Image: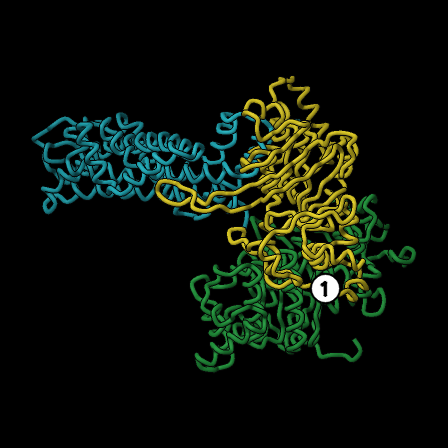
Chain colours: A cyan, B green, C yellow
Amino acid sequence: MEKRPKKSNHLSPAVRTFFNRGAIVYFAVGVAALFLLCALCAGWLTPYDPNKNVIAEAVQGPSMKHIFGTDEFGRDVLTRLIYGSRISLASSLMACGFAAISGMLLGLLSGYYEGAVGRVILRYVDLQLSIPPLLFTIIIGMFLGKGLTGLIIALGFGLIPSFVRLMHSQVLAIKNSDFITALRLGNIGDWQIIFNHLLPNTLAPMITMFAMNLGTTVMLESTISFLGIGIQQPTASWGNMVADGEKFLFTSPLLCILPGVCVVLLTVAFNIIGDSLADALDPRLRGKL
Amino acid sequence: MGEEKKTLLEVKDLRVSFFVDGSEIKSVGGVSYQVREQEIIAIVGESGCGKSVTQMSTLQLIPSPPGRILGGEILFEGKNLLSFKPESREMRRIRGKKISMIFQEPMTSLNPVFTIGNQISEVIRLHKGVNRREAWEEGTKALEAVGIPDPAARMKNYPFEMSGGMRQRVLIAIAVACGSRLIIADEPTTALDVTTQAQVMELLVRLVREKGTSLIVVTHNLGLVARYADRIYVMYAGRVVESGCTKDLLKHPSHPYTKGLLGSVPRLDGDRNQELIPIRGVPPKLDGLTDRCAFLPRCPYPCEACKNRPYPGLRPAGENHMTACYVDIQGGDYDE
Amino acid sequence: MMNERQDPLLKVSHLRMHFPMIKGLIPKACAYVKAVEDVSFEIEKGKTLGLVGESGCGKTTIGKCILRVHEATSGTVLFHGQNILDMSRKEHRQVRRKIQMIFQDPYGSLDPRQTAFDIVREMYVADGATHSREEAAKRVNELMTLVGRPPELGSRYPHEMSGGQRQRLGIARALACSPELLICDEPVSALDVSIQAQVINLFKRLQRELSLSYLFIAHDLVVVRHIADQIIVMYLGHIVEVAEAEELCRKPYHPYTQALLSAIPGVDYDAERARERIVLEGEVPSPTKAPSGCPFHPRCPYASEACQRKMPKMKQVKPGHQVACYRVDWERKCD
């Protein structure tokens, strides 16, 4: 009698909708997977040390030895790009994860317990939203000092308001729906309602939001590193690679262009994935007209 | 109907399908009906029976893809509307000028950023070729004619400033003002309060009679049309299962589905202690229809013919009365 | 006027619900929407009370006040003689499961991510009397059968069901709490005509078998007449007429009830063509702009000056039949 629900039944239309946009989605997933692979297997993919200076080989063009050439300290550009993807992915994933978790928590609090607590949270969110995100992240970054941890926290902080806003509206809508009322009438406790019913039903838009914000964060991280506040030399990050390559813009443009292309590719890929997730996780679009 | 009136709209064997996820949903599977001049007909059926899709097809308003008109003819004033492209000039002239549509939710049919007056006078200007001031005055008169109090002031209102009933009146005013030959009202009163429903129906029918317009009322509620309709078509699972003049059809329903519908609604004079006689089961899914009668699984009078032979098609069941059933549920079994 | 033999199951007295309209940075009520004004009624065990009215008449709000989804402004709701509205949260938990609700939109009242089986089981086991898995499964399947849902369909999700099946599931879930009173808020109006009758019959059968009491809220007088023993007609938060179901439909006194009855379309051809319809002027005003005095007076064909000033008191016209209208005395003379 208690047949387990066929998971495929529930999932397959979602997967189909996800790939609805065709080639571009495959492309985006491919790009994201490629960079993920680079980040995970950086050590095996390249024989060079990304941070070791070989002054004799400084600023070379592409060759068989160095496919994308070397930078001003003679370091292999491809190797630095591969190691840079680590920074980009790690910082964006962790910053978004940090933002999503704290945003969901604050959104849940402000939505479920309206009143003073909720109002204070929302006012704070409004305040933060009135400061440009880049400026906000830079200020927080300066306080937390240079380095990866500081960067991640600074990036994450900047993203919290959007997650809080979304979570708040989701919680409000679901909290007042009939099925939650029905559960209350059955003496089902607050925690059970929140964890078994409220959270699962807010998850779909939150995941979408997460994917969309990954793209933004990649961009933001590079910008900050470019400005010299985020990741510091000699650690490779796409942002500081662009900054360093700037000097050779006219003589060796690849030094500048390649990391820039990586930033754009990854940002676009995350945005496309986010868009497709939004379609796939929306039950009104899934499998319907 | 004493003297024969000219046929205004004739739909012949219309078939419309929606193609979703590789399966075909046969929304309309061979529907024929006709509307004569100055006639009020009703198309009755439950949700998903294809009654609205049929009407949307008449005006070629089916979203395509996924929808597709697979066959049939829609003859309006002798011209086959399906021979025109949906966005062609001819089709656009017919929508609005010759045939008007009134929807269930009036808010979606009015443009929220323009005043009521703007929208009415625009339609009048387009269709009658008068100047702005004349159109505005005519619009005010049109609002007055549909019983909107203080029409001059109301002309300056936006749709959201009006109640549901008022908005529905505005749509009726627009439909009547541009002198349509045919008005299609799709569930015109379903979203309204009971007392407002009565107002809107009385108004619509009075105006239609005055102007000599034909009217198609699409509804799920047989009671709503018992008072007004000349003829009724009952639809089930994408087909017309019974048609006839209102009196005949309500007094002597010949299809088990119609009979079931009539039996399942409580009546004001009925015995409260008696159980209602519901139609058992649920309406069928439209993507798995066979060539058998779609009502068979729910039918209280199944016979061998129904199981072995394809859908019977409409056959006479009296004067001006057609039914798509092998069984004569009034007399004995149908035997062939 | 009810028989004094036993206490009613539910006794609502002078219930008022005024919703504050909140404005400003520092939230402050600037005005009140009087959704329910001085409503009193009783429901006896095993009986059905019908609550009829159009949108904005406060019928749903009354249901939600009884359930304490809304906290009523004033009044008492006695359930088995105890005032629900005065109870602490802890005390309320003791009785809350005895009153359950059936919702208008069967889809919105089911968690889209739960299977039918889980929806009912969760409600059944929620009360802490930890039952074994098998016992719970057995009870859930009993409940499913009781409401006419094949237990094999327990693994379905709400979006895979028809409207009628969803509503049956909603009923099974309510029954999982072993309630004594069901508040049914327009339980059939979202369903197809051919399915409505199935669900109405189900309600009547469950009442016989489980001796349930219903507060049946609907806008359709014909449906309510079929299921209710007594009917209350409401207009903009006020009760305008109360009577036994058949009595009310046979001889309505209040002009609003008369219009409401007259507006209901029937399927009897001769009757439909012959009868005169009372078509009211205007529409139900928004409860935020309720008229003074009798709220019906702007639309009432018989309104006088007195109606604009003060809401008439309920008057008894016959045993068990009360009307709030100044015209009642005059009407009775005509009888």
The residue at the point 32 percent across, 44 percent down is A268
Above or below for C152 versus B9: above
The residue at the point 48 percent across, 40 percent down is A173
* Image quadrant where one finds the N terminus of chain B: bottom right
Callout 1, which amino acid?
A: Arg
Specify whether A66 is left or right of C294.
left
Specify whether residue B29 is in view: yes
Q: Position of residue B266 (x, y in %)?
A: 77, 50
Chain on which label 1 sits = C
Specify whether residue C224 is in view: no
Residue closest to the eye, C224 or B212: C224
Element on which disc 1 rests: loop
Q: Which residue ends up furthest to the right in the rendered image? A: B332
Q: How many C-alpha atoms fall within 10 Å of the one at disc 1: few (<14), some, or many (≥20)? A: some
Q: Position of residue A135 (x, y in %)?
A: 20, 40
Above or below for C139 versus A198: above
The residue at the point 41 percent across, 31 percent down is A109
| Residue picked out by circle 1 | C277
Specify whether A73 is left or right of C285.
left
Residue closest to the eye, C128 or A264: C128
Above or below for A8 versus C306: above
